[in-house]
Amino acid sequence: MIDFFNNTFYLNTSSSSYIMKILPDGILVHKYYGKRIKEQNMDFYNLYKQFDYTAVYKVNGEITTMDALPFEFPTTGRGDYRNSAIVVSGTSGRTTNDFRYSFHRIFEGAAELNGLPHLDCNTENVQTLEIILQDIVTKAEVHLFYSVFEDVDVISRNTVIVNKSESNINVSKCASMSLDFEFSDFDMISLYGRWANERSVERIPLRHGQNIISSTRGASGHHSNPFIALARKNANEDYGEVYGAALIYSGDFEIGVDVGQFDNARLFAGINHETFSWELKPNESFVSPQAVLTFSDSGIGKMSRNFHKMCRKHLGECSKNLPHPVVLNLWEAFYFDLSEEKVLETIKNASKMGVDTVVIDDGWFGKRKNELVSMGDWYINVERFPNGFHRIIRECKNNGLKLGLWFEPEMIGKESDFIKEHPEWFVKLNEIEPIVSRGEYVLDLCQDEIINFVFDSMSGILKKYEISYLKWDMNRNITDMGSLSLQSNCQNEFSHRYMLGLYKLIGKIKKEFPHIYIEGSAGGGGRFDFGMLYYMPQIWCSDNSDAISRLDIQFGTSMVYPPETISSHVSAIPNHQTNRVTSFNSRGNVAQMFALGYELNPNIINESAMESIFQQIEKHRELEKWIFEGDFYRLTDFDDEYCAWQIVSKDMKKSVVVFVVKLTKAKRIGQYVRLKGLQSDKVYKIKQYDLSLTGDLIMNAGLPIIKQLDDFESLFFELSTE
Ligand code: GLA
């Protein structure tokens, strides 16, 4: 997997190669990343002969400019004016750095990152290369880690900076990875959005200069996602070369590409340096979040499947492949209008639906009657629940159900008992009024005392009652960043320290209550990233539960994250966010291949609707046995009038397809949808048509859509080899 000869490092996954070389003067340069090639002499690649009259530098006797050199971990101040990966200053306060190769080691297993989410360390068939560079100016050491996950075609990367000098150093920028290409004829694919409309797909040609996706919100955000893909111009869903980069991080980030004067491209990913800096005393070190890279020579779809496999095999809770409970979440059923009687009645009906778990959402604690009061008062509202949850849990048990509970652990209400006791515990500046949003302030999770307090108050409930499911929400972004616990020269450490505190808090809850299944949420999908998925195998992907809106949202989310991590609920009509009316069939079909759940009031639905839900869940349980280890294929483009996706089982003997009409104008008959990933020579029985066709035919001529479909109507197909 990892080889080193002729001063060259060769990192191979099953279908990609990543190659770097140490130049005679100790500069580490990138040589190649792409389709797997045999190890050979790379000296004739990247000859760096570009010439820029204003800044020259000699490498290997050739006149060249630093602006052309493919630095593996670039710095500022020495003639490379493209995006730097690291900025460190020592006592002089200057920010010029010059890192040169010092030594390296190769070890079995993956890099360990204390306190940060990361891919599994103790996995077999994974090797890690650690390259140590030292800055001639500040004596800071940078350790570049590359863990090669051969089986899933992923290379993880992270950086550790160690202060080897005798005085303090300041790190004002530290990327998790940087990667140079000699060319820039790429399109950049990223996911943008807003509340209730997360992760739309955008594909744009790279421009010269910086092309950046970022967040400074204290969360990865609804508006951007810590992921980009670079696709060759001719690449599409199924063909062509695509590079994917993502961060295993949930806070302020930047991922981008800097296209230089010689049309070279530099891809970088890491913490957003705008809200970051870090003081290091002698011998202290700083660990960056982990980035993951994958290369596909078969289009965007394969890049997605590589990320899906990585998540399933190597990412924390996701790799445990826990069965996901089908939940009935009570938010859209009752909003804040909760009572013991209502919940008891709901439990009876929920058991008729056939769900596993009833989740009591917001509104069960303190004096919570709307979003403005009681945030953080994690004790049961006795007016609404005079018997605590005792009767509710008993009723759940009698009906074969489990109970789930909603928390928003990171916040404190302006109107709460909590704030009266601890008025200094939220994030604020002394000089100006802190910004209150949704009645809440953000807790200062840089402080252990606060983390422990939140942990204790959550534990009080979780220990007292048998709770098996926890929805972890975060409903506002962070403002007024800073912590009373930090000295003025360290205030810019807040954003990352907050994330470390948050991961610590979640880790403590996971450790104390390992049986509790956690679902993430942040005003819907405002923190959908690999960082959260490390702790929570599933995330509520949008507050927009309308089936047709969900097509785009789930399409975009599937670019990076596997379908079983994407909570998808069937909700009532007219839909509460869009007012749209869609058939029960379509609402079910859109959710069926994801983490299915329900978001409606079962006390007001009739027998036949109840029976349909029951059937839907039965079907899901049957499919769940194989779809969440299968390959996910997008069959249409983001902007198409139709949306269709497909899952093929691992053994390629079974497949399911959903086809939904998205736009009103899309009323045509005689459609064919070309399926993917089947075995050409096998005959597949299509259950819904009682028809058998070869994989060859279905993948090339297509699966016929013989019914005329109205607006927002859909079809669900099941295929299996005979
Ligand atoms: C967020 C979540 C919703 C619901 C509300 C409760 O918006 O995304 O599902 O839990 O909070 O306040």
Image (cartoon, rainbow, N blue to C red):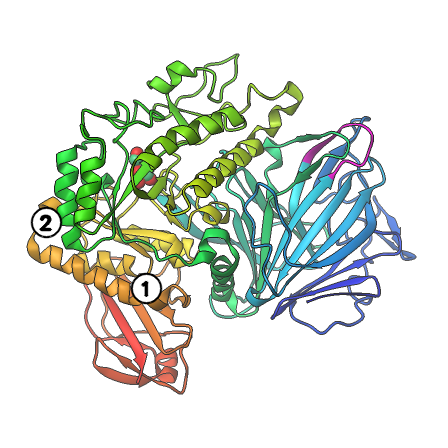
Residue occupying image coordinates x 60% and y 44%: 289
Q: Quadrant of the C terminus?
A: bottom left
Q: What is the x, y in percent for residue 84?
A: 71, 43
The stretch in magenta equals: 162-172
Query: What's the amino acid at mark 2?
Result: Ile
Does residue 57 appear anywhere in the picture?
yes
**Residue 545 shown left or right of residue 337 in the figure:** right
Magenta stretch contains residue 465: no
Which of the four quarters of the rendered structure image does ligand 1 lie in?
top left
- Disc 1 marks which residue? 624
**Residue 54 shown left or right of residue 661 in the figure:** right
Residue occupying image coordinates x 62% and y 32%: 276
Magenta stretch contains residue 165: yes
Residue occupying image coordinates x 50% and y 46%: 531
Tag count in the figure? Answer: 2
- Disc 2 marks which residue? 605
Q: Is residue 443 above or below residue 396?
A: above
Query: What's the amino acid at mark 1?
Result: Glu
Q: State the residue in front, 543 or 139.
A: 139
**Residue 606 shown left or right of residue 533 in the figure:** left
Q: Is residue 467 above or below residue 416?
A: below
Q: State the residue in front, 468 or 398.
A: 398
